[in-house]
Amino acid sequence: MTSTTEPPATPQRTPYEPAYGFPRALWRGLARVPVPPPFSPRTWRSPLRGRWLTSVFGLVLLVGLPVVIVTGFLSWLAYGPQFGQAIPADVGYLRPPPLAWPTSPAWLYRLTQGLHVGLGLVLVPVILAKLWSVVPKLFAWPPVRSIAQLLERVSLLALVGGILFELVTGIMNIQYDYSFGFDFYTAHYWGAWVFVGGFVAHVVIKLPTMVRSLRRGGPGRWLHDGVEETEPEPADDEPGHSLVATSPSPPTMSRRTLLGAVAGGSALVGLLTIGTTVDALRPLALLSPRGRSYGTGPNDFQVNRTAFAAGIGPGVGDGWALVLRGGPAGGVRLDRAALAAMPQHTATLPIACVEGWSETRTWSGVRLRDLAARAGVPAPAAAVVASLERAGPFARATLQADQVLDPDSLLALRVGDDGGGPMADLSLDHGFPARVIVPALPGVHNTKWVGAIDFRDAQRSGAGPVRGGA
Ligand SMILES: Nc1nc2c(c(=O)[nH]1)N[C@H]1C(S)=C(S)[C@@H](COP(=O)(O)O)O[C@H]1N2
Ligand SMILES: [Mo]
C-alpha cells in the first residue's frame, strides 16, 4: 500500500539544543510542553524587537553607565574613608583605590555628583526601553540549554536586579523617601558592586553580538524605515530564545519613532533635572522635592535640612561662642563679634549635595587656617567640626589637613548671591551663627550651626576615626 504519510520523524538536532544525552532529552521534552503565555513565544509580537534595536540601547548604556558607576565610587571616596566617614565605613577588599579627595577644582564634587544623579536619571528611559526590548528572553522556553547559558542567566540576575535596585533606592533617596527601612548608603554601595559584577559579565559576553548587530543594521538600514516599511529584523540563530517575534503583529510605529520617543523621554528628564545643578535654570527643576523657596535675598537657595528639623531654635545665637580646641594652651572661645573682628575672606564656592543638587554662593567669614593658628595648631593633621546639633549623622565632620588649610576654606558668617550682590548674615536655615564651607567638599560635611572645632595635631593621639553622616 502506498502512503503519503511521512516516515516517523527522526528529530534532527538543531544547533541551539544540547548535543547529547540527558540534557538533550530534557530539552526536547520541555520544548514539546505546550506552554501558556508569557512563556509561549507567540506572546511577544512587536515587530520592532530584535538584536539591532537592543544593541542601540545597549551602546548608549555602555557609554553612559560607566560614568554613573565611577562617579558613584568617587562620591564614596569624597566622604573621607580615612576618617571612617564614608558609608559604609568598612568595605574590606571592595574598596575603591585610596585617592585623596582634593580641594581643587572647587566644582569637582558638583560635577561628579551632578553627573552621578543627573545622568543616572536621564538613562532611566533607556534602561526601561532596553528591558522592554529583551523581555521575551525572560520567559524563553525551555529556560536553559547549557551550563554556559545558565551562568549567563545568573549574571543577568545581578545585572537587571542590580540596576533596578540602584535606580529605585537612588531615586527614593533624592526624593527623601526612606520607606525601605534600611540604610540607603550601605545598600546602594553593595548594590553597586552586585550591579558592576553583572555589568562586566554582560559586556564581556555580549559585546561581540552588539558590534555585529550594529554593523548589520548599519546606518540607514532600519533607522530610516517609516512605519509602513517597518518589518521585523531577520530571525537570529536562536529560535525559542530569539528577540524577533515569531508571529509579529503589524507595526504601529517605526523604529525611528520608538528611538525618538525614548530619546525625548531622556531629554525631558534631563530638562527637569538640569536646574538642580545649573543655577540659572533652577525654575525648571520641577522634579526637585520640597518647596523651591528657601529664604530671602542671598539666603534663598536650597536647604537640605531646616533649623526646625534639626531642633535649632531662633535663639541659637544668644550667648553663642565658637570653641576652638586642640592647642597647647587649651580651649579658645570666640563670639560672633570676635570672629567678625578677625580678617574676613570672601570666596565664591558651590555647595554640592550627594543628592545631586548644587548651588553657587559667595561666602564670607574667617579662614579655617586662621582659626587653626588662633587655636595654636597652625599645621593640623585634621579638624573635627562639631555642630550645635549634638546627635545624629550631621553632628560632626572630620576635615583633611588640606581642607582646613585651603585659603578658600571658611567658617562663613555671611552669604551673598553668585554675582557680587549684597551680602547678608547667614539665615538660621543655612547655619547661623556660623557654618563651614570648603571647596569641593561634599555638602554634608559643610557643617551648619558650628559649635566647636577641634584641630588635631599630627603627633597628638586620639585623632582616630569619627563617624560622619549622610
Ligand atoms: N548641622 C548640620 N549641618 C549640615 C546639615 C545638617 O542637617 N545639619 N546638612 C548638610 C547637608 S546634607 C548639606 S547638602 C548642606 C546643605 O546646606 P544648606 O542647607 O545650607 O544648603 O549642609 C550640610 N550641613
Ligand atoms: Mo547633602
Image (spheres, rainbow, N blue to C red):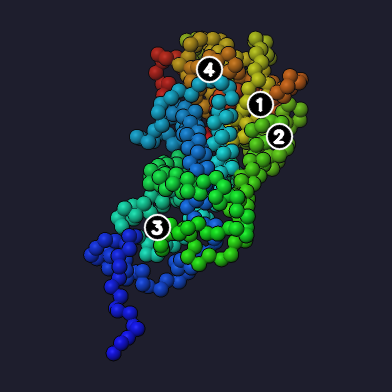
Residue carrying label 2: 281
Q: Nearest to the eye among marks 4 and 2: give it.
A: 2
State the CA–CA distance, disc 4 to disc 3: 62 Å
First reached walking from the N terminus: tag 1 or tag 2: 2
Give the tally of numbered discs.
4
State the CA–CA distance, disc 3 to disc 2: 49 Å
Residue at point 56%, 66% (across, down): 249
Whether residues under marks 4 and 1 lie with C-beta atoms below 8 angstroms apart, the answer is: no
First reached walking from the N terminus: tag 4 or tag 3: 3
Residue at point 32%, 86% (across, down): 3
Residue type at mark 3?
A: Asp
Q: How far from the left and from the top, in percent, is residue 87?
A: 46, 35
First reached walking from the N terminus: tag 4 or tag 1: 1
State the CA–CA distance, disc 1 to disc 2: 13 Å
Residue carrying label 4: 404
- Judge the density around disc 1: few (<14), some (14-19), many (≥20) Cα neighbours within 10 Å: many
**Secondary structure beneath label 2:** helix
Residue 12 can be seen in this image: yes
Q: How far from the left and from the top, in percent, is residue 171?
A: 57, 45
In the drawing, does residue 328 fall left or right of residue 450? left
Residue at point 30%, 87% (across, down): 2
- Judge the density around disc 3: few (<14), some (14-19), many (≥20) Cα neighbours within 10 Å: few
**Ligand 1 near label 2 (Cβ, under 8 Å)?**
no
Residue carrying label 1: 360
Whether residues under marks 1 and 2 lie with C-beta atoms below 8 angstroms apart, the answer is: no
Q: Nearer the viewer, residue 266 or 405?
A: 266
Q: Nearest to the eye among marks 3 and 2: give it.
A: 3
